[in-house]
């Protein structure tokens, strides 16, 4: 492969120009011929990925159009040294995680805490908790509150008493700004 030092004007080119595609990899620029996609059928996975990217781009455009939400992304983009739009795309693609469900203080009494640790590449905006018995009957449900802004530690306070000896299934759903969800589940026998 030949290496050519481009003139400063051409170093800034990105995308396609005629039949050529300029791609930036690290400090270098790669020039390639535009792929000929004529006559090729896309696979279902390719079509699904294109649709997912279309949805991500729509989310990015919605953020850019809303000054309040854009401001939130602007601050983080400046800290990370990334463009705001690419940060919104990344946030759309990365759903939050439920990292831990701590039931050590939950004994089935009203007010007992269930502590959840949730994380996301950008921000977790909500954590919902659902308690059911082993047959799937609803015991209670509600939202957990974040201990301190940006801490990733959420606490749910039980609102229903549960009899000793009952097995409780605790399902947790963490949500981020684009609506991505991360799930977690744990069982505890009281």
Image (spheres, rainbow, N blue to C red):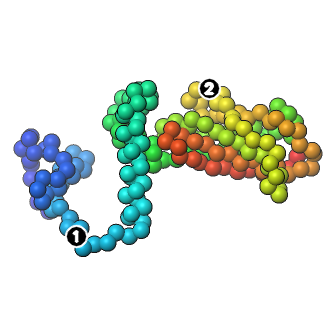
User: Residue 66 vs residue 169: left or right?
Assistant: left
User: Residue 22 vs residue 110: left or right?
Assistant: left
User: Residue 164 vs residue 187: left or right?
Assistant: right
Q: Residues within 10 Å of mark 2 (few under 14, many from 20)?
A: few
> Image quadrant for the N terminus?
bottom left
Q: Which residue is mark 2?
A: 148
Residue found 64% across the figure and 34% down from its top? 153
As helix, strand or loop, the secondary structure at mark 2 comes to loop
CA gap, disc 1 to disc 2?
54 Å
Residue found 24% across the figure and 50% down from its top? 25
Along the line of sight, the residue nearer the viewer: 76 or 17: 17
Q: Which residue is mark 1?
A: 38
Image position of 167 with respect to 66: above or below: below
**Quadrant assignment, res 159:** top right
Q: Position of residue 143 (x, y in %)?
A: 69, 36
Looking at this view, name the residue that lies furthest to the left.
7
Residue 79 in view: no
**Quadrant assignment, res 3:** bottom left
Looking at this view, name the residue that lies furthest to the right.
164
Residue found 86% across the figure and 40% down from its top? 108
């Amino acid at each position: 492969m030949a290496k050519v030092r481009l003139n400063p004007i051409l170093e800034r080119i990105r995308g396609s120009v005629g039949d050529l595609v300029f791609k930036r990899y690290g400090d270098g620029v790669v020039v390639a011929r535009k792929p000929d996609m004529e006559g090729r059928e896309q696979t279902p996975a390719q079509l699904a990925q294109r649709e997912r990217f279309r949805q991500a781009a729509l989310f990015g455009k919605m953020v850019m159009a809303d000054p309040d939400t854009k401001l939130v992304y602007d601050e983080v983009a400046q800290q990370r040294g990334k463009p705001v739009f690419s940060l919104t795309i990344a946030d759309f693609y990365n759903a939050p995680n439920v990292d831990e469900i701590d039931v050590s203080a939950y004994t089935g009494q009203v007010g007992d805490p269930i502590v959840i640790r949730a994380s996301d590449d950008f921000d977790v905006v909500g954590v919902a908790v659902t308690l059911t018995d082993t047959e799937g009957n609803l015991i209670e449900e509600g939202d957990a509150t974040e201990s301190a802004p940006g801490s990733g530690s959420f606490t749910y306070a039980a609102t229903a008493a549960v009899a000793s000896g009952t097995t409780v299934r605790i399902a947790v759903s963490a949500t981020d700004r684009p609506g991505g969800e991360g799930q977690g589940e744990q069982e505890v026998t009281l």
